[in-house]
Image: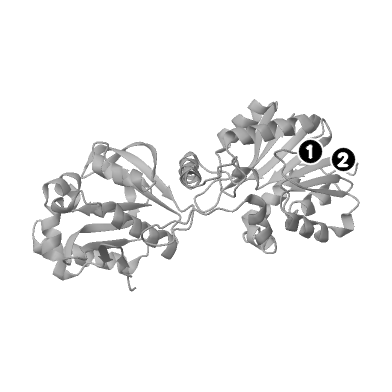
Amino acid sequence: MLITNIETKRLDLRPFTREDAYAASINSRQPKVAFWMQDMILNNEEDAIKWIDWINEKCQASELFRVFAIERKEDNVCIGLIGYAPKAEINNEIEILFAIADPFQGYGYAPEAAKALIWYAFEKQGLAVISAIIKPENTSSRKVIEKLGFVYGDSRRLNYNGNMADFDYYRLYHIEHIPDADWNFNCNVEEMSEFFDARADGYDSHMLKRVADIECYKCVAESIPVNSNEMDILDIGCGTGIELEYLLNRVPKAKVTCIDMSEKMLELLKDKYSSKAQQIHTICGSYIGWEYPQESFDYVVSSFTLHHFMEDVKAGIYRNIVSSLKPGGLYIESDFIVDRMMMEQYMQRYFRITKELVDKRYSGYYHIDIPFTIDLQKELLLKAGFSHVSVFHEDIKPEGSHAVLIARK
């Protein structure tokens, strides 16, 4: 399998060749490198050749194993290595590894090479997450990892050269498109209604491209008992009304108030459910500032919309929902839910983007994802005044996570 070279402003990342044996051996025995990577010391050129052959065999055999020589463009000198591979000590998660020879440290080569590697891993190889384990006292590597946006997870006791040693565990998720090897992000963001108006025609196919996505919409309806009586339901951030099909199958006489900022989305909803026009009332506007009628709804539902708000705005929405529910009423939320480490990474991204905005506005004015953990969602719902919150459905994984929560007034 041909391994692609990766180029940055100052570096070429390329496969190792036997001609690199001398440099690889020398680099591995530099005092700082040897201290932190004792398991990769190459005592001579013969050892280096064997190591290079082994590395290239592994790279040919598996796309999950990539190790590149780092060559400096200005003089074609091999200054170190960088790559990723499954790590047995952390359940074969894909771990990043890098080493810059002592004379070349302090010039920013490590983060430059790592950005290119991560771009390749995420955008070209389709990896969903990369892990890192670093000894707590290795401050230089910690700085590189944290600069790249890796989020600290915990401290672990792992096997290292036959002995147990302490390591700090980090993760980086593929949560956004990385445009190039230098990470030249475009921080332009769209206002929420404009974003969804522009994507209305392809919204259903985008949101329902996996069986798991369809099931998550179905779960919203399945939280409501089959009932032939009339009832009132509020659907906030309804979009094109994907969940309405399943809701109206279970409660066919329900009157549904649908509110969304996208006029084009609501037009598609009304066209889709034209036979139910007498039961569906649409409102084009923001459900943040909408005047919620008091104790008017048996159920309030939302699907994949609340993950655009920070805690303060979301808490206000939840308080409005509580006030609009009849006593004993339920709020059912299906949304993008993540683990703690991914949430922190999304927060980093949110603040990176909003830092560049001249017009800051409130969270949710612009289309920027800010998903929370289940625990934080439950905490916010209880603080808003719900008496009980339960998890009806949960599927948390790196390549796409969601959950359905039920909150009772």
Decide: is 140 above or below 183.
above
Q: Position of residue 147 (x, y in %)?
A: 34, 45
| Figure quadrant of the N terminus | bottom left
Instruction: Name the residue: 9% across, 56% down.
Output: 43
How far apart marks 1 and 2 lie (CA) works out to 8 Å
Q: Which residue is mark 2?
A: 231
Q: Nearer the viewer, residue 390 or 330?
A: 330
Q: Position of residue 347 (x, y in %)?
A: 49, 41
Mark 1 crowdedness (10 Å alpha carbons): few <14, some 14-19, many ≥20: many
Q: Residue furthest bottom?
A: 2
- Badge 2 marks a residue whose secondary structure is loop
Quick check: 101 left or right of 265?
A: left
- The mark found on residue 196 in the picture is none
Task: Report which quarter residue 270 is drawn in.
Answer: bottom right
Instruction: Name the residue: 75% across, 53% down.
Output: 241
Q: Nearer the viewer, residue 85 or 146?
A: 146
For residue 42, say whether it is visible.
no
Q: Which residue is mark 1?
A: 299
Quick check: 307 left or right of 243?
A: left
Instruction: Name the residue: 48% across, 42% down.
Output: 351
| Figure quadrant of the C terminus | top right
Q: Amino acid at mark 2?
A: Met
Mark 2 crowdedness (10 Å alpha carbons): few <14, some 14-19, many ≥20: some
- Badge 1 marks a residue whose secondary structure is strand
Task: Report which quarter residue 384 is drawn in.
Answer: top right
Whichever of callouts 1 and 2 sits on the residue coming sooner in the sequence is: 2
Quick check: 319 left or right of 168?
A: right
Q: Position of residue 53 (x, y in %)?
A: 21, 67
The answer to whether the residues at label 1 and label 2 have Cβ atoms under 8 Å apart is yes
Q: How is the image coloured?
A: one colour
Number of numbered discs visible in the structure rendering:
2
Q: Amino acid at mark 1?
A: Tyr
